[in-house]
Image (tube, rainbow, N blue to C red):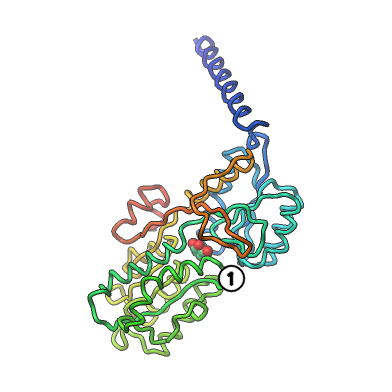
């Protein structure tokens, strides 16, 4: 019985394999590189923030599923020399493509000159790599839109167009070496600056310049220390000087700000509106607890899938999908970019966005 059933199945499978094999040869001209086992170097900035662990894992899984061998490395605790050394090793070991989320966008010029000489295409992942002609493509989320969403959220929550104010606000963005802050922060300011100008919003610290509000390494501890300073300098407290909003460019900084405010006696009942980005587990828990108002969800599964598509196109000699040829100039010219669309996450929609979509399990949020 078993045998009779087995034979036709095998025959069908062989036929499918033959058809797929022929199709692959036809499509790729010289055969499908993925099946030939190309090797891809993936360099992520750090293990210390949740998102990069997820990015690294997603990339590795999807690349391996597509038939590639993967060399995945994390740059210590955001340590530039470690990242440079790891990329050097990847180049020396003859990877076919490099995927890099830079710790510092300006620190890879030299090492990537070697990649360029060796003819290795480079995909800048999430963060643009500056001042090098080695970058072939860039894949990220619409970073200006991320900032706009944060600014718009504060504008709507405080009803800034209709209320005279003044409302008190402070600002936190990320690492000064991360080119993304040059989109996140201006994106938020494209909404909020007008209200600072007409006095509806007031930053008592006077710190509204991108470099004044930057957070080295996007560090939670550094953000917490700066917020603690701002609290003591300006007497922010639930019963004293009011603070209505803290614009944070991402979740790791938002978490530091939240810690400082909770330590100063703020609770869910009087917490300023705090923005974020990434929908990190800790921040989602803070949203559920009423301690963070919003985060911007950037589905790392989508970004990883876009990049794997880019890799396959490169390996097959095709042009990958590109939807922005205007906005991302790395100092040597415009880098062809694929932008994904971020989504606002709040207490209203986090379940659908994060749990129903399988991004997190219920246990990860509630345990
Ligand atoms: C940015 C990234 C954000 C956030 C931040 C800190 O470059 O776009 O999603 O994770 O780095 O790692």
Where residue 108 appears, as percent x and y from the top left, is 67, 63
Q: Hey, which residue is sitting farthest left in the picture?
A: 162
Counting every numbered tag in the picture gives 1
Q: Is residue 278 above or below residue 4?
A: below
Task: Point out the image quarter for the C terminus.
Answer: bottom left
Where residue 244 appears, as percent x and y from the top left, is 32, 78
Q: Tell which of 9 and 14 is nearer to you.
A: 14
Quarter of the image for residue 287 reads bottom left
Q: Residues within 10 Å of mark 1 (few under 14, many from 20)?
A: some
Q: Residue at x 61, y 62 (%)?
A: 129
Q: Residue at x 41, y 56 (%)?
A: 342
Quarter of the image for residue 17 reads top right
350 horizontally vs 138: left or right: left
Quarter of the image for residue 206 reads bottom left
322 horizontally vs 129: left or right: left
Asked which secondary structure carries label 1, the reply is loop
Q: Is residue 365 above or below residue 289?
A: above
Q: Residue at x 31, y 68 (%)?
A: 290
Q: Is residue 228 above or below residue 309?
A: below
Q: Tell which of 28 and 291 is nearer to you.
A: 28
The residue that disc 1 covers is 177
Note whether ligand 1 is within 8 Å of mark 1. no
Q: Residue at x 34, y 70 (%)?
A: 291
Where residue 89 appears, as percent x and y from the top left, is 74, 55
Where residue 127 appears, as percent x and y from the top left, is 55, 61
8 horizontally vs 240: left or right: right
């Amino acid at each position: 019985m078993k045998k009779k059933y087995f034979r036709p199945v095998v025959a069908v499978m062989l036929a499918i394999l033959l058809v797929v094999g022929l199709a692959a040869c036809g499509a790729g001209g010289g055969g499908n590189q993925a099946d030939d086992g190309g090797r891809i170097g993936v360099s992520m900035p750090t293990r210390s923030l949740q998102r990069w662990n997820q990015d690294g894992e997603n990339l590795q899984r999807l690349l391996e599923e597509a038939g590639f061998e993967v060399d995945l490395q994390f740059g210590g605790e955001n340590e530039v020399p470690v990242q440079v050394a790891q990329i050097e090793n990847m180049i020396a070991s003859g990877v076919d493509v490099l995927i890099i989320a830079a710790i510092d966008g300006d620190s890879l010029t030299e090492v990537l000159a070697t990649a360029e000489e060796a003819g290795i295409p480079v995909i800048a992942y999430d963060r643009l790599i500056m001042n090098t002609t080695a970058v072939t493509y860039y894949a990220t989320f619409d970073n200006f839109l991320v900032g706009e969403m944060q600014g718009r959220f504060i504008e709507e929550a405080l009803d800034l167009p209709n209320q005279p104010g003044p409302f008190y606000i402070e600002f936190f963005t990320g690492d000064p070496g991360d080119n993304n802050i040059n989109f996140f922060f201006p994106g938020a300011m494209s909404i909020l600056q007008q209200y600072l100008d007409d006095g509806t919003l007031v930053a008592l610290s006077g710190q509204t310049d991108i470099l004044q509000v930057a957070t080295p390494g996007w560090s939670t501890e550094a953000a917490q220390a700066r917020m603690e300073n701002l609290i003591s300098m300006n007497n922010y407290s639930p019963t004293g000087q009011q603070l209505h909003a803290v614009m944070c460019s991402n979740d790791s900084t938002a978490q530091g700000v939240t810690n400082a405010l909770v330590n100063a006696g703020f609770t869910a009942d009087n917490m300023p509106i705090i923005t974020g980005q990434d929908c990190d587990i800790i921040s989602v828990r803070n949203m559920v607890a009423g301690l963070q108002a919003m985060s911007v969800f950037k589905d790392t599964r989508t970004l990883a899938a876009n990049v794997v598509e880019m890799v396959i196109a490169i390996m097959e000699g095709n042009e990958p999908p590109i939807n922005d040829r205007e906005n991302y100039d790395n100092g040597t010219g415009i880098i062809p970019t694929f932008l994904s669309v971020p989504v606002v996450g709040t207490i209203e929609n986090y379940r659908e966005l994060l749990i129903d979509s399988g991004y997190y399990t219920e246990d990860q949020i509630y345990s």
